[in-house]
């Protein structure tokens, strides 16, 4: 996909960036790890927990280099890119550990470098390796990743795709006001700024409604309409898809010509720089998803998550790096798709959550031919907010999870205050995930769907040792994720 995304100039700049990175890596071996997430999947929490566990000797039995004692030192260091905001690890971990609140999600790109000193597992490796690996964690919103396919779409294709999706299922009602405005304007009439603003604002309102917790839809480009930042009010964010576009050239000075020009400006100003300066320089990638939230919202949200993952995975350049390709054009040779919040289920359903995640990515992998890339799926909890227990009910043992629901969470009519610990039966995912992908039945009911109780819990209160030292943040399979993403670099 990469050659079609960039111009010759962009490709040259990418090659220069990679040559610079590789020259630096000769003296300071570095791996650039991209971390993103779709719709509240918890990427800020993932990074904070990963760093906290590495710095504080967390329980990471599946992270081989640490388990075998070959890692001698772990430290944070200044990041190499001075123009990128630093990921504020200290603030986020304080919110988790001291205040027991989930940190605010980041709404822009940020970076953090963590360096590991280690001893190679082989004598040959100890002879040639520097025994040091810097991991540059690049944190960016999932909405930015979903924008990359726009680089291969002209304005008409973008409009046709967006309008087709907007007329399906629950989106049809959410898009009603925007579609009424869009169908009422004369697209070939004179361009008018107030009409453009009205269209853009109603389109952005539709996208926000799709992303809301009540709907939890995932396919939402253009991403900056949801997080405009310093571009708010700019012409590059004041456009909208239009219906009924023909293949004929837009009349000069028309509303259609204005929208087309601004769409292309959005790609040039927003999407291309992200691809060239950040995404094209990544070595490894983790994509976090909240599959349980989609399950809780029904087949339409699950199908939309599958569609979004297909768009996401199509952005990666599959395959392993050769020496030459790594110098001029990197390939992301390992991609991890991880379903978070595994602690919201009993461990008996973890394999089922992983099966669901594998089903979500299978179609994308087949369609875009990613057999050359290392694709892995797993279910994890970056921070384990619950414990498991069992209760007796009607003479049977019922597996439950125990935690402190966030204030305002509700189940069976009971509203929690944020302080009381409670046990709930979370429900079970089906062994076969296929029913989760089926359309609603004729009556509009969610047929054959599991009853999964998805509550939000406060972060756990950390236990202390006899010496008063707090233990590292508990997790589920964070060590397995580390081993997949960069364990081989410490061999």
Image (cartoon, rainbow, N blue to C red):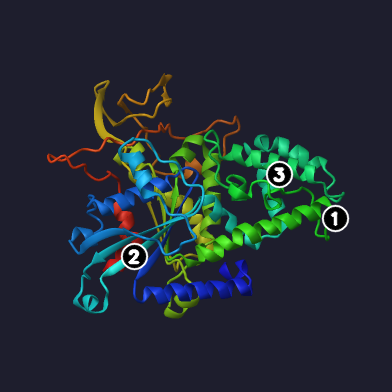
Whichever of callouts 3 and 2 sits on the residue coming sooner in the sequence is 2
* SS category of the residue bearing label 3: helix
Label 3–label 2 contact, CB within 8 A: no
Residue at image mark 1: 253
Label 3–label 1 contact, CB within 8 A: no
Query: Vertically, is 468 above or below 274?
Result: above
Q: Nearest the camera: 119 or 86?
A: 86
Query: Few, some or many C-alpha atoms within 10 Å of disc 1 (few <14, some 14-19, many ≥20)?
Result: few
Q: Is residue 65 left or right of residue 154?
A: left
Residue at image mark 2: 134
How far across and how far down the image is residue 201, in percent?
69, 41
Label 1–label 2 contact, CB within 8 A: no
Q: What is the C-alpha distance between the residues marked 3 and 2?
A: 43 Å
Residue at image mark 3: 200
Whichever of callouts 1 and 2 sits on the residue coming sooner in the sequence is 2
How far across and how far down the image is residue 1, in percent?
57, 67
Query: Vertically, is 434 above or below 236?
Result: above
Whichever of callouts 3 and 1 sits on the residue coming sooner in the sequence is 3
* SS category of the residue bearing label 1: loop
Q: What is the C-alpha distance between the residues marked 3 and 1?
A: 18 Å
At horizontal 52% and vertical 46% (from top left) the residue drawn is 305
User: Quick check: can you spot residue 169?
Assistant: no
How far across and how far down the image is residue 236, in percent?
68, 53
Q: What is the C-alpha distance between the residues marked 1 and 2?
A: 52 Å
Quadrant of the rendering where the C terminus is positioned: bottom left
């Amino acid at each position: 996909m990469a050659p079609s995304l960039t111009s010759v100039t962009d490709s040259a700049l990418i090659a220069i960036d990679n040559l610079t990175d590789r020259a630096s890596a000769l003296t300071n071996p570095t791996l650039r790890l991209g971390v993103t997430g779709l719709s509240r999947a918890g990427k800020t929490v993932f990074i904070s927990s990963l760093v906290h566990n590495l710095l504080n000797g967390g329980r990471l039995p599946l992270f081989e280099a640490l388990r075998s004692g070959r890692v001698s030192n772990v430290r944070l260091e200044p990041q190499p890119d001075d123009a990128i905001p630093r990921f504020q690890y200290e603030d986020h971990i304080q919110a988790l550990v001291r205040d027991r609140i989930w940190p605010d999600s980041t709404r822009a790109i940020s970076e953090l470098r963590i360096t590991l000193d280690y001893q190679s597992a082989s004598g040959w490796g100890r002879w040639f390796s520097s025994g040091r690996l810097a991991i540059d964690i690049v944190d960016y919103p999932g909405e930015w990743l979903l924008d990359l396919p726009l680089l291969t779409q002209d304005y008409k294709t973008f409009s046709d795709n967006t309008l087709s999706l907007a007329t399906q299922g629950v989106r049809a009602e959410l898009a009603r006001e925007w579609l009424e405005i869009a169908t009422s304007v004369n697209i070939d009439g004179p361009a008018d700024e107030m009409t453009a603003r009205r269209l853009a604002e109603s389109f952005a309102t539709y996208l926000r409604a799709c992303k809301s917790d009540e709907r939890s839809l995932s396919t939402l480009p253009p991403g900056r309409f949801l997080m405009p930042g310093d571009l708010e009010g700019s012409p590059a964010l004041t456009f909208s898809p239009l219906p009924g576009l023909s293949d004929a050239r837009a009349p000069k000075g028309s509303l259609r010509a204005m929208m087309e020009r601004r769409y292309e400006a959005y790609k040039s100003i927003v999407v291309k720089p992200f691809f060239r300066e950040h995404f094209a320089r990544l070595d490894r990638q983790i994509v976090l998803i909240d599959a349980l939230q989609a399950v809780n919202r029904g087949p339409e949200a699950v199908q939309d998550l599958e569609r979004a993952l297909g768009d996401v995975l199509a952005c990666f350049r599959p395959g392993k790096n050769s020496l030459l390709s790594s110098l001029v054009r990197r390939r992301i040779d390992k991609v991890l798709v991880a379903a978070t919040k595994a602690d919201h289920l009993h461990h008996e359903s973890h394999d089922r959550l992983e099966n669901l995640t594998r089903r979500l990515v299978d179609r994308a992998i087949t369609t875009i031919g990613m057999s050359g890339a290392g694709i892995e799926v797993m279910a994890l909890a970056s921070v384990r907010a619950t414990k498991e227990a069992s209760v007796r009910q009607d003479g049977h043992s019922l597996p439950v999870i125990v935690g402190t629901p966030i204030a305002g969470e509700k189940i069976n009519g009971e509203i929690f205050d944020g302080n009381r610990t409670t046990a709930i039966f979370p429900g079970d995912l089906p062994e076969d995930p296929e029913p989760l992908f089926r359309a609603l039945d004729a009556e509009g009911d969610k047929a054959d769907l599991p009853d999964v109780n998805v509550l939000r819990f406060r972060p756990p209160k950390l236990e202390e040792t006899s010496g008063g030292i707090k233990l590292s943040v508990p997790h589920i399979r964070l060590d397995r994720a580390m081993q997949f993403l960069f364990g081989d670099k410490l061999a």
